[in-house]
Each structure stands twice: as structure tokens, then as C-alpha cells.
Amino acid sequence: MKWSASRLIELLRTERSPWQLLPVTIILFVSFSALAPATFPSVINLQSMAIQLPEVGLLGLGVMLSMVTGGIDLSLVAIADLAGVATTKYFQRALGPTGTGGSPFIVLVGIAIALAVGMGCGLVNGLLIGKLRMTPILATLATLELFGGFAIAWTGGHALQTVPIDLLNLGNSFILGIPIPALIFVVAAIGTALLLNWSRLGLLMSFVGANATAARYSGIRESRALLGTYVASGLLAGLAGVIIVARTASATPDYGQSYILLSVVIAVLAGVDLNGGFGTVLGVVFSTLCLTIIQTGFVFLGLNQFLYQVAQGAILIVVLGFQAAQAAGVFRRRRARSVAPTIPGELSAPAGVSERSETEFNV
Amino acid sequence: MNMRPQIAARDLPDLAARLRGQNNEGLVAAVMGLLVVLVGMVDHQFWSLATVFNVLQNSLELLVFALGFLLVLLTGGIDVSFDAIGIFAGYTVAVLAGRGVFGGGIILAFAIAAVIGLGLGLVNAAIAAGLRLPVLIVTLGTRGLFTGILLTYIGSNYVNSLPGQLGSFGGANLFTVHVGGHLASLNVLAVPLAVVCLLLALLLRRTLLGRGLYAAGGNAEAARRVGFPVGLINGVALCLAGLLAGMAGVVHITLIGYGNPFDLVGQETNVIAAVVLGGASIFGGKGSLLGTVLGVLMISLINYSLVLLGIPSVWQQVAVGVLLVAGIGAQLASRRRAASAALVAEVAQ
């Protein structure tokens, strides 16, 4: 691939190209740097942003994967919390209630437990959505309550603080000035990109999301693709859980309630098609960067933390409105829109239900 | 418009079908009855007037939210901003009353909250129905928007004492009973809420708008071709839901007696579970007011039973989650059964 100015312009002009977010990211960074020149563009701030970014980025990747199949995963935050709680519970057992030492082996087992819990929770989602054919939104809304409930019940609602020093180091140290969580995020993003673009499962996911009926008639086992999707997003959430524990030195059963909105905003800003069939890892990375810059920028400008929530809501609605206007042909000639039924199990539904108008989302 | 319940009913003996109800209301009532018997056998104190009053009292606020959620669900949308609207309206009323802007008259409080709720509902409607965007995603966004605006511009402190009727109304009880040192009572609010329920039931059954809600949710395209203004109907549902949520916010603050802007948000699953358990279809176009009332009572009953049985309150969330999964699962199962029954009938013809 040759990098030239014309190539870059071409990338930027391609419809739904993730590169469109690059100028947005740069503009945001430059504006906040101009508003807080002494502090915002400093190395320390960049490092602190790079420490904050991975957990929401991983959740955003998970939501993106589920959206590619035409669903959505609202339960990821609860999965991350439950995974963190499970790991810390293991540390409590292995180290005693006050122990903070521990060997690398214990840390590795702890991480494995978190990832396994993440995949297990994802499997539950996948079974509900793929096998029982529940609507993803409702299934994950219910499991959000369920997994979060387990985390709260397991801890009695308190934060657990038994975290071995090795894991804390993992969460708060740097390699060549780059925080380790950020490196983990990069690896996870590359892994997700490989899964989405170069694996059998990724291809199936896109097929199922683009047109579930066609996929089914082509002999694709939809339930398997969905199962794989939600296990993968659960795995990402489990990893986010580890990073949260490592960064905050505790596992809080109801940590990050605002991440539910945030992870959806990240995916939508990344240009993931709500109807399924399209999503890019690069888009998620850029939109996570954008939102982290906005969050940190707000802090540096001394703005109320709740305004960030307002900004998230506003971004979500503006981006969706923009996409709707684009789809309706406000900005250019009307482009052919693909029919994308999103409710799994529509084939078995009475005829009336599946025949929604094309312009209406099935959410 | 919606043939599923009739098809399902034809397969069953007539009486059983009628007892079960169009939206499984009978089934919900039966499960509740069973629950009452079982819990009562473990703890005899359960069978008392105090339980009735406690469950009803706990249902009041949940019910008003649930009614609004039902209206939107009938059109096929899932509104998750109702709790944000509720606390926005409720807390704003508390702040206004606390600053002496109005004297705390309960009717005025409800009127102000209703207007605020209607306004926020209008925002939802303009975005979701106007731009034809999925209601859940939009309301997830507006939920953040409303909560953020509330905490940034209106306030983030407790309003400890509510003036006038707003403060005293929580103690205005219709009935009060003493049971073993415990005081159980039913607030006067139960009466106007019953009236609201009746009015909404009439709206859903007898008016063109009500039928339009079912039509739009059952099959939007068919409704459009029959001549229903589907976009408008979806918008009106969101506005009404906002209005009800605003009023629910005042119910909340009067009953607990203070205004906390951090209340409610994040606790919407109770309401969703109540409506879904009450038989309203998660795909829209199907559901009834009676079912929703029963669903709300069921959730309150279960939460109350958990407390009475000494199960730690931290398990409540798990219980509601399990109920929600079970409710959705049962709906999907019956939907699939109905679909295959329809197929069999078609083949037989």
C-alpha cells in the first residue's frame, strides 16, 4: 500500500471509512491543546489517557462485534465487573484476605479466571441469542441485570481489594513510555481485526449481520456464528475486567455503570452499522481515542464530569441523525440500501412481523 | 393486526383459554397465587393485610413508570430513558418547591412534573420517531443527556425537606394497619393512580390512538397502508411515556420524602421485567393494561417476599434478572408454538 496524499484523500472520501475519524481525532486533540496548552499536550497527560483508554476501548470492540451481527451487547460492563470480582475472589483465597504479594503464577491463574468468566458469560448470552433466538437487546439487558446481580450478591455489594503487586505493576507500568494496558489494548484490537477480517467466524458474522435470511438459506449455521460472537465479546469484556482490577487495585461489583452508554457511543461513532454487516476495528480505536480526548479535555477545562455524559448522549444522537440523513439521501443521491432484517428467528415468525418497512430499524 | 393470541387460543379448550387471557394475564395471576401460598407456608406472617398494603404501596411508583413503558413497548420500542425523565422531573419539582418557587401544592407539583416529562418525551419523540431511529439506542443517549443536564444545571445535592403538601403527602394514608409492631399503610395516591389506569385502559381499548399503538407495533407497514400515521403514533407514545415518567418522579419523591438526583437511574430493569412478565410482547403490538398491573404487583410481591424470607437484598437484582430471562424465554416459546400451529393450520387447509 503506497501512502500518498491522493491515497489519503481517497481513504477519507470513501463512505463509512474509519479514516474519516482521524481528522476528527486530530482536531479534537489540537483544540483541547490550544485551550489548555500547558497541561493537555504533556507526556504525563498522554500517558494517563493511554491508561484510561483500554478498558472502554475493549468494551467498545465487544459492542462492535455484536453490532456486526446485527445485535447489541449491553451486558459487557457487568461481565467485566463479574470477571474482576471472580479474579479478586481467587486472589483472596490464594493470598489470604490481606495478602498483596503473590507469585506471577497466581497472577496468571487470576487472569485466566477472568477471561474464562468473560467467555462463560458470553456463552450464556450466545446461547440465549443464538440457540433460544432471544432479541439481543433484551437478552443482554436481562443478563446485564443478572451478571451485575451476581457480582453484587457475591461481594455483598462491597469493593474487594486483594490484588497482588505483580498485577498492579502490570496495570500501572510502562514499556518505552507506553502504559502496558494500552499495549494490551493494541494486541486485543489486532486480534479482533484478525477475527473479523481474516477468520471464518468473522466472515460468518458479517454474513449473518448483513442478511440473516440469506445467510440461513446459504446453509450458514447462524446460531454458531452468534455463539462465537458473544463468546468473543465476553472474552474482551473479561480482559477489560482484568485491566480495571489492575488499574484501580480493586474490584467493584457495580463499577462503570456509565460505560454502557459509552461503549455504545464508541461503536456508533466508529461507524458500525446498527443493522449489522459492517464494522471496523480501526473505527473503534479512533472513536475511543476521540471520546477519551473529550473526557480528559473536559477535566482540564474544569467542566463538570456530568457534562461528559451530556456530550456522550449528544454525540450518539448527532451521529445517528447524521447517518439517518445520509441514508435518506440528504447529502447526496440516494444510494441503494440493503435490506437487513436483524431479529434472529424471523423465519419462524408469522409473516406479518418480519415485514417491517426497510427504513425502520428493527431494534 | 394481530392474530397470534387467537390462534393460540383456538388450540386450547375454550374455558382454559379464557381464564388464561389474551396476554397470559391469568397465568401471571396464577403464578402470583402460587407464590403467595408457598411463601405463606414458610412464613405465616405473610398472609396478612400488611402484606397486601406493603405490596400495593411498593407498586405505586413502579406502576406509573410501567404504564409509560408499556405504551412505547406496544409500538415496538424499548424506552430506557424513563427513569432519567422521572428523576429529572421529580428532582426539579423538589428543587423548585425547596426554593419557594411554588408552595408545594401536590396538584401543581404533578402538573409541573407532567409538563417537564412531556417536554423530555417530546425530545425522545423528535429524535426517535422523527428520524426513524431505534428507540433503545436513542433513549440510551437521551438518558445520558437528561441525567447529565440534571446534575450539571439543576443540582446534585439532596433536597432534604419538601415544603407543603409535597412533604406531607407521603404520610397521607388511605388505610393504616398495625401488625406486630410494624406499620403498613396505603397512600392516598393509590386512588388517582387507579383512575389513571382506568383512563389508559380506555385509551388503549376504545380510542383510535390506542388501537393505533397496537397497529403500529404489530405491523408498521400494514398499519401505514391502512392509514395510521405510524410515525406520529410512535411519537405520541414516547411523549405520553415521558409525561407518565415525570409524574412517577413526583410519586417517588413524595413517597420517600426527599429529593435525591442520583436516585432511580440504573434501576429500570424492574419496570421492564414487570411489563414483560405482564405479557406485553417484546416485539410490540401485544400487551394489556391489566397484564402490566399484574406484572408490577408480581415484581413487588417477589421483592417483598425476598425481604420477608430473609434473603439478602443483594440477591434482588439476580432475582429480577432471572425473572426477565424467564419472561422473555416464555414469550419466545409461546411465539414459536403459535407460529408452528399457524403453519400446521395452513398446511391442513
Image (cartoon, rainbow, N blue to C red):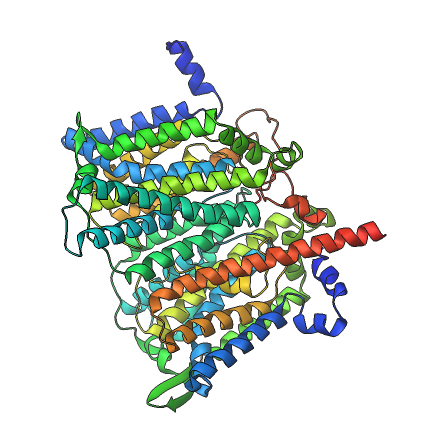
Q: Residue at x 34, y 69 (%)?
A: B313
Q: Residue at x 53, y 37 (%)?
A: A225
Say if residue B104 shows up in the picture: no
Pinpoint residue B42: horizontal percent, then vertical percent.
44, 81
The answer to whether A284 is drawn above or below residue B256 in the figure is above
Q: Is residue B188 left or right of residue A183?
A: right
Pinpoint residue B175: horizontal percent, then vertical percent.
44, 87
Of residues A105 and A239, the one nearer the viewer is A105
Pinpoint residue B83: horizontal percent, then vertical percent.
41, 59
Pinpoint residue B151: horizontal percent, then vertical percent.
30, 54
Q: How many marks do you count on the picture? A: 0
Which quadrant of the view contains residue A214?
Answer: top right
Of residues A255 and B134, the one nearer the viewer is A255
Of residues B160 and B81, the one nearer the viewer is B81
Q: Quadrant of the N terminus of chain A?
A: top left
Q: Residue at x 58, y 74 (%)?
A: B29
Which quadrant of the view contains residue A243?
Answer: top left
Q: Residue at x 63, y 69 (%)?
A: B202
Say if residue B347 shows up in the picture: yes
* Residue farthest to the right, as pictured: B349
